[in-house]
Amino acid sequence: MFHYDKGGSGEFRHGKYMKNKSYRSISILTWVVIITLWVIFSEFHILPAYKLPSPFAIIKTFQDILINGYNYTSFWYHLGISLYRLLLSILLSLFTAIPLGLCCGFFPKFRAVINSFVNFYRNLPPLAYYSLLIIWLGIDEKSKVTLLFLASFAPMYLSSMFAVSRINPSFILSAETFGASKVQIFKTIIIPAAFPEIFVGIRTAVGVAYTTLVSAEMIAATAGVGWMVIDAYKYINTEVVFVGIIIMGLTGLLLDYLLTLIEKKYIFWTGK
């Protein structure tokens, strides 16, 4: 009836499966309750339609946007330009924040140069320095991508740096005993041992960047899902606001799910 996990995790597969299945049922039931209450509140006019439109009105609005677009622009263009801004900023962060974080975690002098600057700006609200980015870079894509890049940089950098500090020192001492150089230790011990925690930072960075997307698109933009939400809000077009929020939420869930699949496939030593 129960099958012991031969991988050494000490868990019974059947029991773990039943537990996950139970949690999934609770999650589904939670959303059923939320949507049911939503229908009741909207259909019985407990809240006015301009505050809480019914799910049916939102579905109809979404169908209209799919067919006719929004503000004379295709829905797929709005979604595509938002994802372009998001994914480009994430890629830039991957190739800068992770190497810098690893180096700062391994070399204290390097950390002294970078760490204070990152800790200073990461606590600033994005709109506080977005106006400065517009002055420096203009109102086109450069300022928007840079804002998202800065938002995603800090979580990746910090997770990379702290991941190095949590590595078991005996691993490094053993490698040094066998004559391994700093470069060899960095490549064969530091990076593999730190990568599980780095990946948590990547997932966090994607979420932070997505929440900053509305800020990036609310000023001097004419397209994007975040811009749709801001523009619809100006005209009290609540159905479009809900459509944009739901699309962003579902897209964020999809991106996080894809990252989870990548983590399970390529970082299989997590927790071992």
Image (spheres, rainbow, N blue to C red):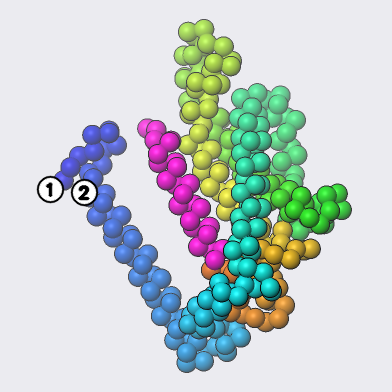
Which of 148 and 106 lies nearest the eye of the viewer? 148
What amino acid is found at the position of numbered circle 1 in the picture?
Met
Q: Earlier in the sequence, mark 2 or mark 1?
A: 1
Q: Nearer the viewer, residue 190 or 145?
A: 145
Q: Quadrant of the C terminus?
A: top left
Classify mark 1: helix, strand or loop: loop
Tag shown at residue 14: 2
| Secondary structure of the residue carrying numbered label 2 | helix
Predominant SS of the magenta segment: helix
Nearest the eye: 104 or 259? 259
The numbered dot on residue 1 is: 1
- Residue 267 lies within the magenta run: yes
- The magenta segment is 247-272
Q: Amino acid at mark 2?
A: His
Q: Residue at x 59, y 15 (%)?
A: 182
Decide if residue 259 is in sight here.
yes
Q: Residue furthest bottom?
A: 44
Alpha-carbon distance for marks 2 and 1?
8 Å
For disc 2, the neighbor class at 10 Å (few under 14, some 14 to 19, many from 20) is some
Is-magenta flag for residue 233?
no
Please determine whether, in this image, residue 35 is positioned above or below residue 153. Answer: below
Picture quadrant of residue 120: top right
Residue 36 figure quarter: bottom left
Q: Are the residues tagged 2 and 1 within 8 Å (C-beta)?
A: yes
